């Protein structure tokens, strides 16, 4: 028994040293080229419109919830009508007649949320705002029907909101969200960055995910964090504790110090269980036979 106690003490010291080790690391990645373009970019070959687009990360900024739009059923709505509850909101700026990037963003977003254990309409909502003031509720409704069908989860249509609106309201929301876009006369199209935003139930910008590919883990952790733990499982909460959001890449990377703490706690618990089992076994062997 003495030898067992010594071994346990040594293991506890080793576990404690792991917990106390300060370290930090994060996963890095390269976002899609052009996701963050500063005004006046130096490339002279870049069209003027493209020099003006990009994302400004206005984290924790409150969206203008009084901005007015028209939903996919033709009803006038305030942006704030999608906030104020317990669910985070996935927000994206697109336009429904976009021939290229918007379709890729919507396809990627739909494919990613289809892989999540969280359900649109139940655990989070989606708000898509058209940046083209000429677009109509009928176009929004057609686009909604397409992507609700792609999502293939019955009853989720109440969580998808495709909006159109006046240019002043669109620009108000886009400015606060840090979404810079421009009309390109040469191509007769909107130039815009690619990415989506996760917003809190109160309407604040929580996270940006850039490009046209969104990792399911990154999106799920962003939704769990934005909801302040109101969606997701205990396992998601533990995973969120071990990961750190990098605003430059829009991704979550391993936070080693926290991970080591969790590993240390699990090690101590395992050792405790081992001691309990061994003590009970030893007492059972020493008990006189009846």
Image (tube, rainbow, N blue to C red):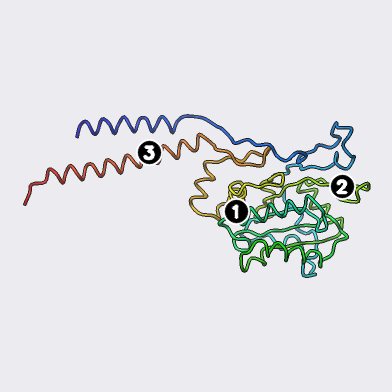
Q: Which residue is mark 2?
A: 182
Circle nearer the N terminus (1, 3): 1
Viewer-closest of 153 and 123: 153
Q: Nearer the viewer, mark 1 or mark 3?
A: 3
Picture residue at 19% right of the left edge, 44% below the top: 281
C-alpha separation, residue under disc 2 versus residue under disc 3? 55 Å
Between the residue at mark 1 and the residue at mark 3, the CA separation in whole angstroms equals: 30 Å
> Residue 6's x, y, as percent?
26, 30
* Disc number placed over residue 227 in the picture, else none: 1
Q: Nearer the viewer, residue 23 or 26?
A: 26
Earlier residue among tags 1 and 2? 2
Give the number of the disc on residue 260: none
Rounded to the nearest whole Å, what is the CA distance between mark 1 and mark 2? 32 Å
On the rendered structure, is 145 left or right of 87?
right
Q: In the displayed structure, would residue 159 be above or below residue 233?
A: below
Tell me where residue 74 appears, x and y as whole percent: 80, 69
Quadrant of the drawing holding the N terminus: top left
Place residue 156 in its image quadrant.
bottom right
Q: Are dots 1 and 2 in contact, CB under 8 Å?
A: no
Q: Residue at x 67, y 46 (%)?
A: 207
Quarter-of-image position of residue 148: bottom right
Give the vertical position of 220 relative to 4 (above or below).
below
Q: Is residue 182 left or right of residue 201?
A: right
- The residue under label 3 is 267
51 and 115: which one is in front? 115
Q: What percent of the width, then of the height, locates residue 248?
A: 68, 37
- 117 to 214, vertically: above or below: below
Identify the residue at image location x=66%, y=47%.
Answer: 214
Drawn side of residue 97 relative to residue 198, left or right: right
- Numbered disc 1: secondary structure: loop
């Amino acid at each position: 028994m003495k030898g067992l106690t010594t071994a346990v003490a040594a293991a506890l010291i080793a576990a404690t040293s792991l917990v106390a080790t300060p370290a930090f690391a994060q996963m890095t990645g390269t976002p899609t080229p052009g996701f963050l373009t500063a005004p006046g970019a130096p490339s002279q070959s870049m069209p003027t419109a493209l020099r003006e687009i990009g994302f400004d990360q206005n984290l924790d900024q409150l969206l203008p919830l009084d901005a007015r739009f028209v939903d996919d059923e033709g009803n006038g709505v305030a942006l704030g009508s999608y906030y104020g509850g317990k669910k985070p909101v996935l927000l994206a700026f697109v336009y429904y007649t976009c021939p290229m990037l918007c379709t890729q963003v919507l396809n990627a977003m739909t494919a990613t949320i289809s892989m999540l254990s969280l359900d649109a309409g139940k655990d989070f909502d989606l708000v898509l705002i058209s940046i083209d003031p000429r677009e109509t509720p009928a176009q929004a409704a057609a686009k909604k029907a397409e992507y609700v069908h792609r999502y293939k989860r019955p009853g989720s249509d109440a969580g998808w909101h495709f909006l159109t609106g006046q240019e002043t309201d669109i620009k108000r929301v886009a400015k606060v969200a840090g979404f810079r876009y421009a009309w390109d006369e040469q191509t007769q199209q909107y130039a815009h960055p690619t990415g989506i935003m996760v917003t809190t139930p109160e309407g604040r910008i929580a996270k940006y995910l850039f490009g046209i590919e969104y990792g399911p883990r990154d999106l799920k952790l962003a939704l769990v964090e934005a909801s302040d733990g109101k969606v997701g499982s205990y396992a998601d909460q533990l995973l969120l504790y071990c990961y750190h959001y990098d605003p430059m890449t829009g991704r979550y990377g391993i936070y080693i110090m926290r991970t080591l703490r969790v590993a240390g706690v699990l090690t101590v618990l395992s050792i405790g269980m081992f001691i309990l089992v061994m003590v009970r076994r030893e007492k059972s062997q020493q008990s006189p036979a009846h």
